[in-house]
Amino acid sequence: MRIACLLIRNLAVQVASTDASALRGQPLVIGGLPFEAKPVYDASSEAMIFGINVGMPLHQAYALCPEAKFLASDERRYEKVFWQVADVMEGFSPLVDIEGLGCAYLDVSGIRNEQSLAHNIVASISGDIGLSACLGISSGKFFSRVAAFTSRTEAPVIIKQRKEKEFIAPFVIDFLPCSAKTRERLQLLGIRFIGQLSQFSEEALLAQFGSDGILIYELAHGIDWTPLVPRPKLEVILDIAELEPPADTCVEVLQSCQIMLDKLLSSVRAQGKLCRELQVKVIFDSGALQERRLPLKEATSSRAALLRRLGTWLEGIKFPAPAVEMELSLYLARDDGRELYLWPEHQKVRREFVKTASELKLRFGYQPIKKVQVVEPKAVLPERRFRLIDLLE
């Protein structure tokens, strides 16, 4: 297998600079305002020159560079943009594995001209989304990531097959994906570079470092069996309606949306899923088109919540002519339930927790959620000290 790793450095900074071109070339710190008790989420290269690093307190970053522009982080926005990057990558390979924000892998096995492919992927992401990306290709995820880390946008790094051992040898052991304790012990043993590990047998490293020993032995010998895990596909359902008579106002269009939502949401609820994003397309009699993808703050199957989101957008668009057709798409997610803190202090949340427990009792015929009651505090045996009772007792 041949694997490409796409790396987008300073994703948050790049997104902010794309949204506001005036920020390009300026010291930029993402994370919040200087007086907020938060760490630096990301920083531009112009800000890092002053010693600002990711993770340091914002007030310290301000002390190092008061002239820097400070912006709040928006992880939802970054996730959305990087999902668009993954969509572009799927145009080159059906198997895309997202490791985290800014890093993804794709299967490029069978491609003859890998250099040309790498340039095309980087150029597509730059042209379609406006982000600068680096890319590396090898026969393993670890080596491809290191290759991407050392590459430049205009110069992807391609490691030839069976040359991974020679490539990785001069890199320091800090690149190894092992525990901090293992790296510390390697330092104490005088091992600074990955290539030095190839002089030890697998048995010796296993005896010294356990499962980490097998991992570092294989990586030092250019072996990486880590599989690619395809990213989950977004499921989408849609409905198309012809507006007869044509709609002149957003209120009339919203009434059609309500009918379409009733039909779509019956299917969504039957599958036990939620809508996490909307896409609406309105076609006008003049041939003009208004289209928008509307992310939701929280996945839901509530018709009222979806109508509010649609109404907010429809009220802001101009009708160049009567609307004659519309298309409504729902992007679905699994309903994994909601997480509540056990024994929350906030009374409103506590009432909601008790309500959930009551509903479970009605559903199952018994109370599955228990709480601990102290019976004999001084008892030696724990089972005599406490007992479990129903939450609602």
Image (cartoon, rainbow, N blue to C red):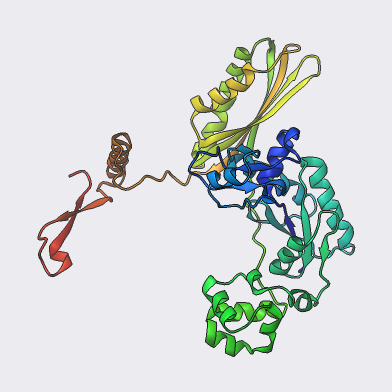
| Count of picture labels | 0
Please give left or right for residue 173 compared with residue 92 in the image. Answer: left
The quadrant of the rendering that contains the C terminus is top left
Tell me what residue is drawn at x 51 percent, y 42 percent: 271
The quadrant of the rendering that contains the N terminus is bottom right
Tell me what residue is drawn at x 83 percent, y 60 percent: 156
| Residue 23 falls in image quadrant | top right
Q: Residue 117, how many percent across, how many down?
A: 86, 57
Tell me: residue 78, above or below residue 306: below
| Residue 16 falls in image quadrant | top right
Q: Residue 95, how many percent across, how many down?
A: 72, 57
- Is residue 235 in sight in this rendering? no
- Is residue 351 in sight in this rendering? yes
The answer to which of 7 and 250 lies nearer the viewer is: 7
Tell me what residue is drawn at x 56 percent, y 39 percent: 32
| Residue 106 falls in image quadrant | bottom right
The answer to which of 42 and 163 lies nearer the viewer is: 42
Tell me what residue is drawn at x 62 percent, y 83 percent: 190
Tell me: residue 51, above or below residue 19: below
Tell me: residue 126, above or below residue 193: above
Q: Residue 379, how many percent across, how many down?
A: 10, 66
Please give left or right for residue 218 compared with residue 178 in the image. Answer: right
Q: Residue 143, how many percent across, how many down?
A: 72, 69
